[in-house]
Image: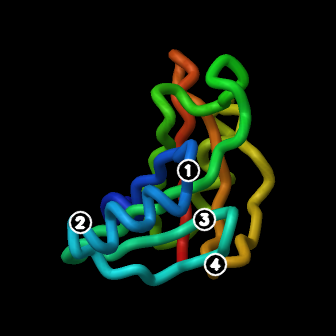
Amino acid sequence: MAIQGLFYIMILASDLERSKAFYRDALGWRLDTDVPGQVAGFWFGEAYLVVSQDHRPADQRRYAGGSEFSVKVDDLEAQHERLTKAGLTVSAIRKQPWGETNFGFRDPDGYPWLYGAA
């Protein structure tokens, strides 16, 4: 049961199409996931960026600073059990439509974190 490193970085975008054009065309990152109106994912080297559409007013966003961080782990269920036993409030383990299985929690300042596995 070991942490393997950063899984991906997720940011929120007020205009997903504009962001897709920027990362794909301006930066040359490879578009991999493309769910119109919802989410786009880009490879840049061995790292991955997820851009998610956010239609809510800024004061209603749940992400601190408009971001969320996901850590790739080798045994998701064991990490979920360990953090639960440690007293953290963790979400249920969820299977995402893009192939990831994850669960979330927040740090003491409210920053959202996910532990995930592909």
In this figure, which residue is indicated by the disc labeled 4? 98
Task: Kindly report the distance in space between the C-alpha atoms of the residues bearing marks 3 and 1.
Answer: 11 Å
State the quadrant of the C terminus.
bottom right
| Lateral position of residue 84 relative to residue 111, left or right | right
In this figure, which residue is indicated by the disc labeled 1? 15
State the quadrant of the N terminus.
bottom left
* 10 vs 85: above or below: below
* 40 vs 57: above or below: below
Q: According to the image, what is the colour scheme of the structure?
A: rainbow
The answer to whether mark 3 and mark 4 are in CB contact below 8 A is: yes
Identify the residue shown where x is 68% and y is 40%: 85
Identify the residue shown where x is 72% and y is 77%: 97
Q: 60 and 70: which one is in front?
A: 60
Mark 2, other Cα within 10 Å: few <14 / some 14–19 / many ≥20: few
| Mark nearer the viewer, 4 or 1 | 1
Give the numbered dot on residue 26: 2
Three-letter code for the amino acid on which mark 3 is drawn: Val
Residue 19 point in image, percent of width and height = 43, 57
The answer to whether mark 2 and mark 3 are in CB contact below 8 A is: no
Three-letter code for the amino acid on which mark 2 is drawn: Ala
In this figure, which residue is indicated by the disc labeled 3? 39
Task: Kindly report the distance in space between the C-alpha atoms of the residues bearing marks 4 and 2.
Answer: 25 Å
Three-letter code for the amino acid on which mark 4 is drawn: Trp
**Reading the chain from its start, which is encountered first: label 3 or label 1?**
1
**Quarter of the figure with residue 102:** bottom right
Task: Kindly report the distance in space between the C-alpha atoms of the residues bearing marks 1 and 2.
Answer: 16 Å
| Mark nearer the viewer, 4 or 2 | 2
Three-letter code for the amino acid on which mark 1 is drawn: Asp
**Reading the chain from its start, which is encountered first: label 4 or label 1?**
1
